[in-house]
Amino acid sequence: MTTNPFDADRPPERQSRRGGGRRRGGGSGASSNDSNGSQAGRRRTDESVMVPEVSFDSYYGRHIVKPAPWEKEVAAYLFLGGVAGGSALLAAGGSALNYPALRRVGRLGAVAGAALGGAALAKDLGKPSRALNMMRTVKLTSPMSVGTWILTAFGGFSGVALASELGGILLDGGSGENPTGGSAVALLSRALKLADGPATVGSALFGAPLAAYTAVLLSDTATPTWHESYHELPLVFVSSANLASAGLALIAVPTSQNGPARKLAALSAVVELAAFEVMQHRMGATLSEPLRTGKAGKLLRLSRALTVGGAVGAVTLGSNRVVAAVSGLSLMAASALTRFGVFDAGIVSAIDPKYTVEPQRERLERRRAAGATHDSITTAR
Amino acid sequence: MDFWRNQLSGPTNPSVDAAWKDGEPRKGFFTDTSICIGCKACEVACKEWNAIPEDGLDMLSQSYDNTGALGASTWRHVAFVEQSSDRIEQARESGRRLVELGMPSLRSREGSDAVGAPGGSPLGTAATMPQTNGSLAVADVPALPDMRWLMSSDVCKHCTHAACLDVCPTGSLFRSEFGTVVVQDDICNGCGYCVAACPFGVIERRKGDEGHENGKQSHGISIRGSSSASVVDATTSTTQSVGSAHAANSGFANNGEVKNVGIAQKCTLCYDRLGDGQTPACAQACPTTSIKFGDLADMRAAAQERVAQLHGQGFTEARLYGADPNDGVGGTGSVFLLLDEPEVYGLPPDPRVTTADLPDMFRKAGYAALTMMAMAAAAFVRRRP
């Protein structure tokens, strides 16, 4: 053991990261662990104090892909965008089939969801003052750019639809009569009535893409769990959006008009639960692990319980005002929990190199076993 | 049709696809880690030339690597790995398996094309390169040392299909005439999408003291390591005062502020120097020519020559990373010669550009949107009496 004055500068010995059992299932894994240990034991002179044992299928346990630098605002946006999109569809249905309360709540939910969601997105930017730079180009390879334009169009149509709703109340005094004459108020009122139909249709047409594209937004990343869920995640997200907007309607619409919301809740709950199961199954044990374990697992389990409870409550006792409201609240909470759960699971899968290395290594070995020798990034020549 | 087929994956010339007309050859690095001595001159030269702020003076307990990883303020990162002889043996074995797999190379494919053979079969490849395989069989296997250092200077890969560039919603990231990928820091609004999209974890959003532009400006720069230094003696206090002097210096240069906080940052392959016919700072500073810079075609050829040479000497652990344009990112602009599996260096073993699946993702989302509308319509169906 040498001692010199510079030994005092050494950092405290790092704890071994080998406890996680993260070594690949290669044949010589266990034996090399042992000999690693004895090797380190033999060399346990001054430099091995500085250099602890390392698990070699990752670089000091560091993540390979970087987690998205997104905060809770983005997860909240996933939820709010869903509320907005689903509400627009309910509003359109309510407008066409004469559910005035449903139409009103839907229009309000569409605009509020889009506005709050947009604000959350802007707040999450590294440079919020440059939020409008999103609109300097249209880029089909960027789901965020596509989503920006979907949200913009949706916001425009929904805003006009809500203005028409409010105009009907404020300008006409709720009389429903067409005000005559050339006054500015009368002109505005007539213009809003003219715009009502197209705005409702436009809002509904952009509502579904608004709810669906957020799944692509997450999937089009190198974050393992998000990317590999891309087959079913859109279906999970649109069903979740329907649940949230049906929940909002159940809370705010009188029971005489909440029939469509109750049916939508039941239908969407079934689709969401089924899609989520299929999604986990397709992803396999490793990649779906972040969805089943830890904080994300807890959120998603709670979400499923609330979905079932809310949907059953809405279908069976939705004609009771109190039960309808409680069911609606539970459906909205379920939708929010789904979004936060999927969001968290992705971040976890990015931070732990296991989720990057193991699936990639597996698919590489599978391809090599099948005789594919032309598409690996590592080559012998 | 060929143009469209290779826009999201597969071999292509990215600067031509980006509509550059003046025909600059694609530039790139060849980082030969077998002759890297871990001096970190590349890291220093990169920081100096690009005026990158200090990002922590910690001791990380990662061998001699106290830089950590590539990031917003680390555009070159030297990895240090220490291995015992059994790990070296494993690396040699995995490399041998790779050789035996008959991985095709550019050279062998060109060769088989020339003779009109239906190229790509492992047999054909072996037949066109008998000298390599032959020498492998008879070469004296070099003795296994008790331990070895792996030192590798990592950098942005400047992918042929760059996910960061594909997903950037503002157009801040662009493809330069040299085929490289560069951030325009006056356009980027810090959405962070590129950070999540990069399959190599290279690009990152720069943090300030408060992380956001409207936060408190950082006056001077925090030294994260200083608070954890528990030994109070003369040596430690000297370290701290040296650190403070450094902080004051960089503060002077930037008027006390970290520039580009909240903005995505990464290696530009020294776009400013390339435009003037110069070599990137890291390659120019490298004392062992471990980092080579030039036309990408030359870099790939040099890499293939070097790996064949090492194989000929019996070092079967040598392998190339990113030299094949058929891989998941269409080949990288930064080619590496590695001496173990990529994950040992913190590189992904089988990266795939996420946007290769984008058409399928949008299709699935389209079906989902239609399903959503159908569900809403079904909810309004009334039972007629």
Image (cartoon, coloured by chain):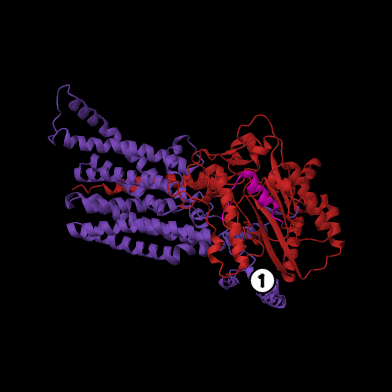
Chain colours: A purple, B red
Q: Label 1 is placed on what type of residue?
A: Asp
- Specify whether residue B48 is in view: yes
Question: What segment carries the magenta color?
Answer: B39-55
Where A71 sits versus B20, above or below?
below
Q: Secondary structure at mark 1?
A: helix
Residue B201: x percent and y percent? 57, 53
Where B350 sits versus B158, above or below?
below
> On the image, which quarter does residue B80 sit in?
bottom right
Residue B237: x percent and y percent? 59, 64
Q: Which residue is found at the position 38% from the left and 59% from the top?
A: A273
- Specify whether residue B163 is in view: no
The residue at which mark 1 appears reads as: A7
Q: Is residue B164 left or right of residue B323?
A: left
Residue A174: x percent and y percent? 14, 36
Q: Subunit of mark 1?
A: A
- Along the viewing direction, whichever of B16 and A200 lies nearer the viewer: B16
Q: Is residue A325 magenta?
A: no
> On the image, which quarter does residue B84 sit in?
bottom right
The mark tally for this picture is 1
